[in-house]
Image: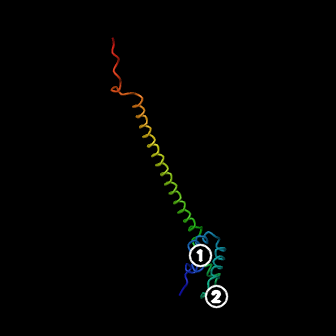
């Protein structure tokens, strides 16, 4: 059975996608050296030990260059952070708006209560004193 790069990394308890993103931003020589070490750690493969640098170099050539995988993950992370920040800003605005409306309503009720208690109604007035 052939061993895929992903299954080989999983056997080494390495996330293949994260490792590919990490290796893609490294210089080719350093990425190949890193892969060389990883391949060397794999238990009994069909390759000779002298073939490992060639295998590692071929695999590095398959990686996206310029860190595009890492940049893509960073861009997704930035997008999620911006969306979360926008949601928090909206939530704060809604809470403040609701608090202002509640304050205005209670203030209006207080002012109408003060108006009714400070000025007696005409029916509550006592009749004028009789003139003699």
Q: Give the image quarter of residue 3.
A: bottom right
Could you tell which of marks 2 and 1 lies nearer the N-terminus? 1
Callout 1: helix, strand or loop? loop
Question: Residue 85, how many percent across, how many down?
Answer: 52, 55
Question: Badge 2, how many Cα within 10 Å: few under 14, some, many 20+?
Answer: few
Question: Residue 41, how many percent across, how many down?
Answer: 64, 82
Give the number of the mark in front: 2 or 1. 1
Question: Residue 120, how many percent across, how many down?
Answer: 38, 27
The type of colouring in the image is rainbow
Cα distance between the residues tagged 2 and 1: 23 Å
Evaluate if marks 2 and 1 touch, with contact meaning CB atoms under 8 Å apart: no
Return the residue nearer the eye: 125 or 116: 125
Q: Give the image quarter of residue 58.
A: bottom right
Which residue is at a point 46% across and 41% down the rendered structure image? Answer: 103
Residue that badge 2 annotates: 48
Residue that badge 1 annotates: 14
Q: Give the image quarter of residue 64.
A: bottom right
Which residue is at a point 40% across and 27% down the rendered structure image? Answer: 119
Tell me if 131 is positioned left or right of 54 in this view: left
* Mark number, residue 105: none
Return the residue nearer the eye: 117 or 108: 117
Quarter the C terminus occupies = top left
How many dots with numbers? 2
Question: Badge 1, how many Cα within 10 Å: few under 14, some, many 20+?
Answer: some
Q: Residue furthest top?
A: 132
Callout 2: helix, strand or loop? loop
75 to 60, vertically: above or below: above
Question: Residue 26, how many percent across, how many down?
Answer: 64, 70
């Amino acid at each position: 059975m052939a061993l895929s790069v992903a299954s080989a990394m999983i056997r080494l308890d390495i996330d293949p996608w994260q490792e590919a993103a990490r290796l893609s931003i490294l210089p080719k020589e350093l990425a190949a050296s890193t892969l060389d070490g990883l391949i060397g750690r794999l238990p009994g493969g069909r390759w000779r030990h002298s073939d490992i640098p060639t295998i590692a170099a071929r695999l590095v050539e398959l990686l996206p260059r310029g860190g595009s995988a890492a940049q893509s993950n960073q861009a997704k992370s930035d997008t999620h952070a911006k969306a979360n920040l926008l949601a928090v800003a909206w939530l704060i605005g809604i809470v403040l708006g609701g608090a202002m409306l509640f304050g205005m309503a209670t203030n209006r009720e207080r002012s109408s209560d003060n108006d009714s208690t400070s000025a007696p109604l005409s029916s509550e007035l006592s009749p004028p004193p009789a003139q003699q």
